[in-house]
Image: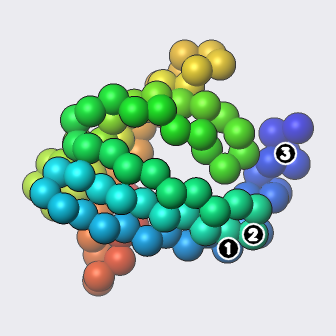
Amino acid sequence: VNVVKRKLAEHDNLKITIEQTGDKFQIKESCNFRTKDFNFTLGVLFDYSLAYGTEVSGTWEMEGDTLKGTFTRKDNNKVLTTTRALVGGELVQV
């Protein structure tokens, strides 16, 4: 099943729109499989469902110009970390 999910993710054409007001973020995700809007505040725990259905809980923190996310999968308690930075006007994974 994981191989199928990865193959689908390769072709999802994900587009993300981000609006920031202070430490609050409004996110709109749009892809071939779904459209989802959600909000989060830096440093505040929130729940999220990844595109392929995995449920996580975690936070985003701002360190300089870099966003660092730490999330825990609800199904197996595995910790996932991710880092994003603004490069050339685009938010990219680093």
Which residue, given by chain and number where applicable, does mark 2 sit on?
32
What type is the residue that disc 2 sits on? Answer: Asn
Along the line of sight, the residue nearer the viewer: 67 or 38: 38
Q: Quadrant of the C terminus?
A: bottom left
SS assignment at label 3:
helix
Q: How busy is the neighbourhood of tag 3: few (under 14 within 10 Å), some, or many (20 plus)?
A: few
Q: Is residue 91 left or right of residue 22?
A: right
Task: State which tag comes first along the sequence, 2 or 1.
Answer: 1
Q: Which residue is mark 1?
A: 13
From where the camera sits, is residue 10 visible? Answer: no
Q: Nearer the viewer, mark 2 or mark 1?
A: 2
Question: Up-down: is 16 above or below 4?
Answer: below
Helix, strand or loop status at disc 2: loop
Tell me the residue at 81%/58% (across/down).
8
Residue 13: x, y in percent?
67, 73
In 3D space, how far apart are the residues under numbered discs 2 and 1 (Cα atoms)? 6 Å
